[in-house]
Structure formats: C-alpha cells, structure tokens
Amino acid sequence: MQLVTQSESGSGAALEVSDQVFAAEYKPSLVHQVVTAYLAAARSGTKAQKNRAAVRGGGAKPYRQKGTGRARAGTTRSPLWRGGGVTFAAQPRSYVQKVNRKMYRGALRSILSELVRQERLIVVSGLRVDEPKTKALIAKLRAFNLNNALLVIEEPDEALMLAARNIPHIEVMLAREVDPVSLIAFEQVVANEAAIAVLEGRLS
C-alpha cells in the first residue's frame, strides 16, 4: 500500500509501505490484552506490611491463661492487639502478565493499521529543527496542523527533544521504542520516512 508523505509546503509524495504492517486487520481483543499487560507491568508492586510473624516481640504470654477475667491471649502481636501484625498483610508482588513477542508485534501492527484507516498516522518529509527552540517547533507543528501528537523519529535528535519538552500534548519517541500505549494516547502519530522504515523493519 501507499502512504502520502506531507511537507510544510503542502505537497505530498507517495511512500510505498508493507501491507503486513500498515494494512493489517484490527483485533480489538488483542490490543486490549497487550495494552492492559503493558500498563500492568509498569506497576511497582512494592507495598509491604508486617503479619504477626514479622512483627518484633510477642514471644511471652502477656498474662496467665485463667483467672484474669480477660480473653485468653498467647501473644501481644496478635492482629487484635495494638502494635500487632496485620491480618491479611500486603506483600511485594509482580503484576507482570505474559505477552509473547508475536502478540506484542501483532498488536502494534493492528494499532498502526487502524491509525492509517482513521487518517491519524501522518508521514512527513522532515521533523528536524535547526536549534532547540520551542518557538521553532511550534511553527513547524502549526504548518502540519498538529495539536496533540506523538512525533516518531528514527534516531535521537537532541534539538527536537529539547524543543518539544515544554509543549503540552506533544511527545517525541524513537521508532525502535514505540509502544502500544503511546500510539493510542495521542490524537495523531507523526513519523518521518526514516522512522516509518524502522517501524516496518521492526514489525515485518
């Protein structure tokens, strides 16, 4: 299939791309599973509380078994006592869900193809700025009529990244690091021709 490459002057040229990557069937269940797994893997899962075994002390029986009029007690570290352990103590855990490489790549292809169908994937001839100035990048974004976009580039560009970091709803990402959540988080995805080639090679 072909994508139209846009330039700041408004003229466009055809760019031949792989149908396997940019014209794949949209699979909502697969996309949902992969996005959910990606977000779950970002959770730290480091919360921890002490159960009655982990609380220090409580080795001695606090008072005799009978004759006090109180309920029998074997330790002061029971969850019923102040300073005791937590009944169902939270423990460190991993939220990682298994997603194999084939599923992950399939979800990326599905999302990219749907972006093409919805005309939300924009290919431009160039995304570079001459100096790390926010004003220069804003002018370039206005030329392409972009307000909420993920800018995908093929290699690190310090000037572009510095120019974009103060603009709300604009983020710069390398093509080799693009993930499903980033692709669906923005209204538009803008990539230069070199970045499209990297995505195509990564997902073919």
Image: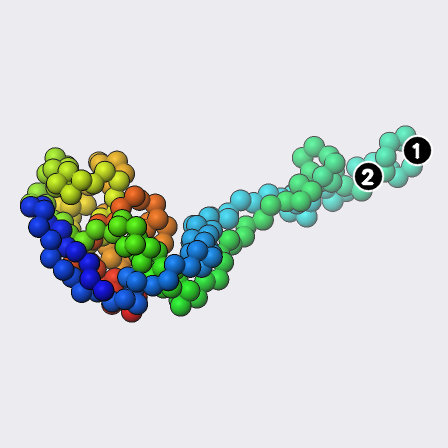
Residue 144 visible at all: yes
- Between 12 and 107, the residue placed more toward the observer is 12
Write the residue at 20% across / 40% down.
146
Write the residue at 45% across / 62% down.
99
> Are the residues tagged 1 and 2 within 8 Å (C-beta)?
no
Q: Locate residue 125, reporting x and y percent.
A: 11, 53
Asked where in the image residue 59 lies, by quadrant, the reply is top right
Which residue is most to the top? 69
Asked where in the image residue 167 lies, by quadrant, the reply is top left
User: 10 Å neighbourhood of mark 2: few (<14), some, or many (≥20)?
Assistant: some
The residue singled out by tag 1 in the image is: 67
Q: Locate residue 89, reporting x and y percent.
A: 63, 44
Residue 197 visible at all: no
Amino acid beneath label 2: Ala
The residue singled out by tag 2 in the image is: 73
Q: Locate residue 156, reporting x and y percent.
A: 18, 54
Separation of disc 1 and disc 2 at Cα? 13 Å
Compared across the picture, whether 116 is left or right of 13 comes to: right
Q: Locate residue 72, reporting x and y percent.
A: 85, 38
Q: Nearer the viewer, mark 1 or mark 2?
A: 2
- Between 40 and 52, the residue placed more toward the observer is 40
Write the residue at 86% across / 35% down.
71
Write the residue at 60% across / 45% down.
90
Q: How is colour applied across the structure in the image?
A: rainbow
If the image is split into quadrants, where does the N terminus sit? bottom left
- Between 28 and 184, the residue placed more toward the observer is 28
Using the image, tell me which numbered label, if any, was put on residue 144. none
Amino acid beneath label 1: Gly
Compared across the picture, whether 87 is left or right of 170 comes to: right
